Amino acid sequence: MRITNPTMNVVLTAFANFIDGPTNNGTMDFYTGAPAASAGAPPGGTLLGTVTFSRPSFQTPSGGSMLAYTISSETNALADGDIGCFVIKNSSGTICGDGDVTGLGGGGDLEFDDVSVEIGDTIALSGLTIYL
């Protein structure tokens, strides 16, 4: 089945609205290890840090993709380890989505220049685009 761009844009808008929630900004947590076996479950790894979405979190979708507004960095990583997965939560703490993290060219849902983190490090995203 193929889905049209206007339909994908509706889905992306709903996803962004769910991240924004009713009151506060959504977040993206970074953990060691693999994503949970099922979507919506927390991963079993160690929490390394959290970045915070702007409000609203994403620009208006177009062509089946949407670009995040500025994402505030984690400026004091909580633990040492390699980032292996991320979890996006809305302002109520409900998990909206997750995925794996790899180094550049590794094929992860999210790719970092360097996945290694030490306590006190900064975890930053220069940009984020979600595609359907």
Image: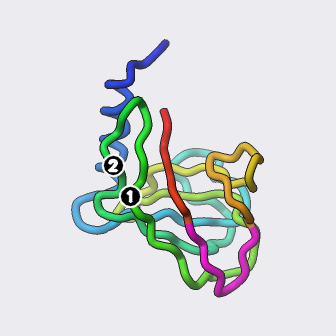
Please say which color scheme the image uses.
rainbow
Q: Quadrant of residue 86?
A: bottom right
| Magenta stretch secondary structure, dominant | loop
Q: Can residue 92 be seen in this view?
A: no
Membership of 120 in magenta stretch: yes
Q: What is the number of callouts on the image?
A: 2
Dot 2 and dot 1 residues touching (CB under 8 Å): yes
Residue type highlighted by circle 1: Tyr
Q: In the displayed structure, does residue 93 sit left or right of residue 98? A: left
Q: Distance between the residues labelled 2 and 1?
A: 6 Å
Residue type highlighted by circle 2: Gln
**Residue at mark 1:** 69
Residue stretch in magenta:
116-124
Tell me residue 25's x, y (percent). Answer: 33, 66
Q: Which residue is drawn at 54% across and 58% down?
A: 87
Q: Camera-side residue: 106 or 99?
A: 106
Q: In this view, does 74 lie above or below 93?
A: below
Membership of 60 in magenta stretch: no
Q: Camera-side residue: 102 or 45?
A: 102
**Residue at mark 2:** 59
